[in-house]
Image (cartoon, grey):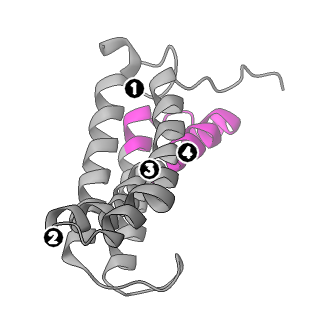
Amino acid sequence: MTSEPLRLRRWVLATYVGLMGVFVANRFVLRPWVVERGGPEGALVVVFSVPNFVEAVMGTLVLTALGLLARARYPDRLGRVSEETVQVGASALAGTYVVSQELGLHDLGGANVVDPWDVGASLLGLIVALGCMRRWGVLRGGAAGLRG
C-alpha cells in the first residue's frame, strides 16, 4: 500500500516548536527570575500555570496528528471519520487527561498540586488548540484548511 505522507500545516509545527521554547524558557529562565525576586501574585500565577497551558495545547495537537495518522493508515475502518471529528475527539482526550491530573485524580504527569489557576490554564489551552484547529485546519490541503 502506497500512501501520501501526512502533511501538517505549518502553523501546527510552528506552534508545537514555539510552545516547547516557551516551556523551556519559562522553566529555566522566567520562573526562577520571578520567584527569586518575589514577583507580584499575578506574575507567579502565570509562570506556574504556563506549563499547564502548554501541555494542553501540545497534547491536543499530538493526539490530533495521531488520530489523523490512524485515519490515513486505516482508511477502510476510519476513512469516513472527518478531520473535525478527530480534532474534537483529541481535545476531549487531552482535556480528560489534563483536567483529571489537575484535580488530583492521577499522578501520571508527576506529583501535582491542585490549583484552580492551573485548571483554568489547562482549559484555556484546550480551547485555544481546538479553536486554532477549527479555524485553520491541521492537514495541508485538508477540508478545514481551505477555510482560511
Q: Circle 1 sits on which residue?
A: 137
* Amino acid type at image mark 1: Gly
Label 2: state its secondary structure: helix
Q: Circle 3 sits on which residue?
A: 60
> Residues under labels 3 and 2: Cα distance?
29 Å
Q: Marks 4 and 2: CB-CB under 8 Å?
A: no
As for residue 67 lying within the magenta part, the answer is: yes
Q: Marks 1 and 2: CB-CB under 8 Å?
A: no
As for residue 24 lying within the magenta part, the answer is: no
> Residues under labels 1 and 4: Cα distance?
14 Å
What is the x, y in percent for residue 8? 56, 26
N-terminal of the pair, mark 1 or mark 4, is 4
Circle 2 Cα neighbour tier, 10 Å, few/some/many (<14 / 14–19 / ≥20): few
Please tell me the numbered disc located at residue 41: 2
> Residues under labels 4 and 2: Cα distance?
39 Å
Which stretch did the figure color magenta? 59-87
